[in-house]
Image (spheres, grey):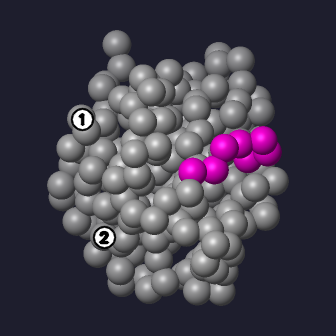
Amino acid sequence: MRHEKLLAADKCVLLVVDIQEAFEGHISELERVIKCSKIMIQAARLLNVPIVVSEQYPKGLGRTLAPIQDILGDCYYYDKVTFSCCQDDSIKKALQKSGRSQVLIVGIETHICIMQTAYDLLVMQMQPYIAVDAVGSRRESDHQVALQRLQEDGVILTTTEAAIFEMTGSAKHPAFKEISKLVK
C-alpha cells in the first residue's frame, strides 16, 4: 500500500501551462523550466500519463515554444484567456474527463496561472502537485512567494526527478531504463 500523497502514473494527469514565445527572455531561469518540462513530458509519455496543454491568448503571446512542441508531438493545445486553467470550461472538462485525481503542473508563470490553477484544482477535489524546477516567473520573488503560499495551502511541491520516480514506483517498471536515461 502506497501513501495517498505519492504521485501515481495511473492517477495523474500532466498539465503543461503557457510555455509560450512571448515569455522568452523574460522568465527567470527559463532554460531550466524548459529542460525540466521536456523531461516531464517525455516521462509522462513513457508512463502513459495523459497530457493537457494550455496556451494563454496565443494570438498575442505566441505559441508554445518550439522545444516543448517538439517533445509534445501531435498534441491538442487548449487556447485560454483565463489565468486559471480551471476557469476555462474546455480545460476543466478535459481534466475531469481524464478520471485522474492528481494533477502535476509545469509551466509559466508560478504566481499567476500556476497558482490560480492549483487553487481551483483544490476546489475541484483534485490534488495539485507542482514540479518546482519546471515552473517559473519573471521575478524570482514572485515565484518563491507563490510556492510558499501554495505549500501552506495544501498544494504538494515536488521536483521533476522526484515526481518521475514516484510515478515509476520501482526499478522493475518496464519503462525504468528509459526513465533513468531522462534524468541523467
Quarter placement of the N terminus = top left
Between residue 174 and residue 38, name the one nearer to us.
38
Identify residue type, mark 2.
Ala
Which residue is at a point 26% across and 67% down the rendered structure image? 148
SS of the residue at dot 2?
helix
Between residue 164 and residue 77, name the one nearer to us.
77
Q: Is residue 102 magenta?
A: no
The reply to whether residue 178 is in sight is yes
Which region is colored magenta? 72-78
Q: Is residue 141 left or right of residue 178?
A: left
Which residue is at a point 45% across and 65% down the rendered structure image? 81
**As displayed, is residue 134 above or below residue 43?**
below
x, y (%) of residue 182?
73, 45
Q: Which residue is mark 1?
A: 125
Quarter where residue 172 is shown: top right
Q: Which residue is mark 2?
A: 146
**As displayed, is residue 10 above or below residue 14?**
above
Please state which of the two labelled residues, at mark 1 or mark 2, is closer to the viewer: 1
Instruction: Of the two numbered discs 1 and 2 on the same chain, state the one appearing first in sequence.
Output: 1
Distance (Cα) linking label 1 and label 2: 20 Å
Q: Is residue 177 left or right of residue 33?
A: right
Between residue 128 and residue 181, name the one nearer to us.
128
**As displayed, is residue 107 above or below residue 9?**
below
The reply to whether residue 104 is in sight is no
Q: Is residue 73 magenta?
A: yes
Q: Is residue 12 left or right of residue 101?
A: right
x, y (%) of residue 149?
22, 65
Identify residue type, mark 1.
Gln
Which residue is at a point 39% across and 31% down the rendered structure image? 96
